[in-house]
Image (cartoon, rainbow, N blue to C red):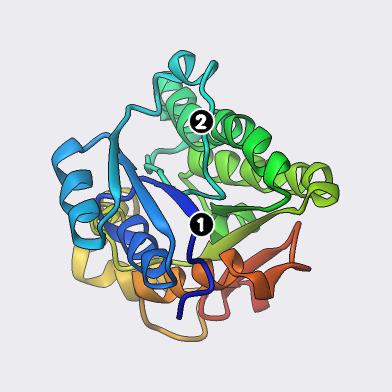
Amino acid sequence: MSDLKGRTALVTGAASGIGAACVHALAARGATVTVADIDAAGASAVAAKVGGKSWAVDLLNVRALEGLRLDCDILVNNAGIQSINPIDAFPPEKFRMLLALMVEAPFLLIRAALPHMYAGGFGRIINISSVHGLRASEFKAGYVTAKHALEGLSKVTALEGGPHGVTSNCVNPGYVRTPLVAKQIADQARIHGIPEDEVVAKVLLKESAIKQLTEPEEVASLVGWLASPDARMVTGASYTMDGGWTAR
């Protein structure tokens, strides 16, 4: 498939997990991809596999992003972190960090990319949100707040970008088999007071009709389609890939 040949893409948090899978999916469609991550070595390794470029960047340094200009046709805002604590014990600095990484940084990258997209009459902004952009869970105040805010940013971008050929959408997976989810298992076991081997069934997949983790490549396949010309009329939407969680 080469429907993105000649297009340039930027994926954040792309040294592993969903981000790396998105890099491979977009490159397979013909795009030239920049792999952005704080892990410089990891980003370079992924970029080398697809003949792309790497960008070692700390997205928490939001001041450095304010004057940025990006010449990319496709932007995938994927970088994210998790923190699990009850609100009354949630560290304020951690709350602010989550919002900076998953709301402020995407806003600044979108702001940096839109002039190029507007000039070319084509743009695809794909925000890796979460089922937690649509639903809440206990002990995840920072993450749930950030993902709900990302949903709003994506919709405003869709309205402003529509007249210029730019679409903006969210992809909302449930729990995906990534290092981020693996780290959560111990945290969830601690918070809920259960053994780690019970966390996936009793906590992570409790609300899902399909009792399996989503694979990164499954998320990436949807990202690839949203970036394609076939998704021209899809904008301002949120695509769940949650095993039926939000059907309840």
**Residue carrying label 2:** 105
Q: Quadrant of the N terminus?
A: bottom left
Tag on residue 7? 1
Q: Residues within 10 Å of mark 1 (few under 14, many from 20)?
A: some
Q: Is residue 19 left or right of residue 104?
A: left
Q: Residues within 10 Å of mark 2 (few under 14, many from 20)?
A: many
Q: How many marks on residues?
A: 2
Q: Quadrant of residue 176?
A: bottom left
In the rendering, which numbered label is found on residue 79?
A: none
Could you tell me residue 205's position as x and y percent? 42, 73
The relative height of residue 23 versus residue 239 in the rendered view (above or below) is above
Q: Quadrant of the C terminus?
A: bottom right
Secondary structure at badge 1 equals loop
- Separation of residues labelled 2 and 1 (CA atoms): 23 Å
Give the percent coordinates (x, y) of residue 24: 33, 66
Q: Is 109 on the left or on the right of 83, as rendered? A: right
> Whole-percent x and y of residue 218?
42, 76
As shown in the figure, which amino acid type bears the numbered disc 1?
Arg
Give the mark, 2 or 1, whose residue is nearer the N terminus: 1
Give the residue displayed 33% in from the left and 27% down from the top: 58
Which residue is at the front of the view, 123 or 94?
A: 123
User: At x 49% / y 59%, what residue is drawn?
Assistant: 6
Question: Vertically, is 58 above or below 151?
Answer: above
Identified at 40% across, 84% down, the residue is 211
Closest to the observer: 68 or 77?
Answer: 68
Which kind of residue does numbered mark 2 sit on?
Ala
Give the vertical position of 56 relative to 152 (above or below): above
Residue placed most toward the observer, 39 or 48: 48
Q: Is residue 248 visible?
A: no
What SS does tag 2 mark? helix
Q: Residue furthest bottom?
A: 210
Q: Residue placed farthest to the front in the image?
A: 6
